[in-house]
Image: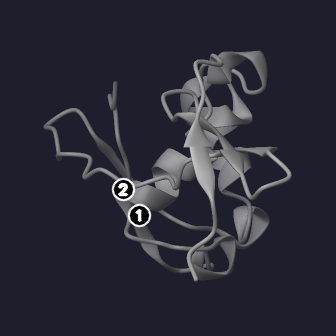
Amino acid sequence: MANYYEETKIDPKQFVPPSSRYADSKVIYYTEKKLLSFNTYKKTPIPTSASDKYAVITPGVEYRPDLVSQKSYGTVDFWWKILEANNMKDVWEFKSGVNIRIPNSFF
């Protein structure tokens, strides 16, 4: 049996910063207990651009896309966009020696 959910009119930005992958999601009540949750996040492709940067992951930032985000964008908040741009599902795929694309723009 499927779990119960109900959409709300609650603004997700009450719970997450504007840079969060959930900032544009819908807030839902989940189960009969009406627990608050977010709708499932669906990745969207980030098109390549001539202004994208490319780099090789060094041992100092292995498993730390947040550090690459900080250096590239001035905030740790976009680590998940770097993973998405490189079709990585988890930080454990962010390994030393791997070539990555750092998107210049994704909004």
The count of marks equals 2
Graded by Cα atoms within 10 Å as few (under 14), some (14 to 19) or many (20 or more), the crowding at tag 2 reads some
Compare residues 45 and 92 and report the one nearer the observer. 45
Residue 65 x/y as whole percent: 65, 55
Residue 62 x/y as whole percent: 71, 71
- Mark 1: which secondary structure? strand
Picture layout, residue 72 above or below residue 74: below
Q: Is residue 70 left or right of residue 33?
A: left
Q: Quadrant of residue 96?
A: bottom right
Q: Residue extending furthest left?
A: 50
| Residue lying at 69% horizontally and 27% vertically, measured from the top left | 75
Question: Pointers 1 and 2 in contact (CB under 8 A)?
Answer: yes
Q: Amino acid at mark 2?
A: Ala
Quarter holding the C terminus is top left
Q: Quadrant of residue 10?
A: top right
Query: Would residue 26 be visible to someone looking at this image?
Result: yes
Name the residue carrying label 2: 85
Q: Is residue 45 left or right of residue 14?
A: left
| Residue lying at 78% horizontally and 25% vertically, measured from the top left | 15
| Residue lying at 48% horizontally and 78% vertically, measured from the top left | 98
Quarter holding the N terminus is bottom right
Q: Is residue 47 left or right of residue 75?
A: left
| Residue lying at 63% horizontally and 16% vertically, measured from the top left | 11
Q: Earlier in the sequence, mark 1 or mark 2?
A: 2
Separation of disc 1 and disc 2 at Cα?
A: 8 Å
Query: Would residue 55 be visible to someone looking at this image?
Result: no
Compare residues 89 and 65 and report the one nearer the observer. 89
Q: Amino acid at mark 1?
A: Ile
Compare residues 56 and 43 and report the one nearer the observer. 43
Name the residue carrying label 1: 100
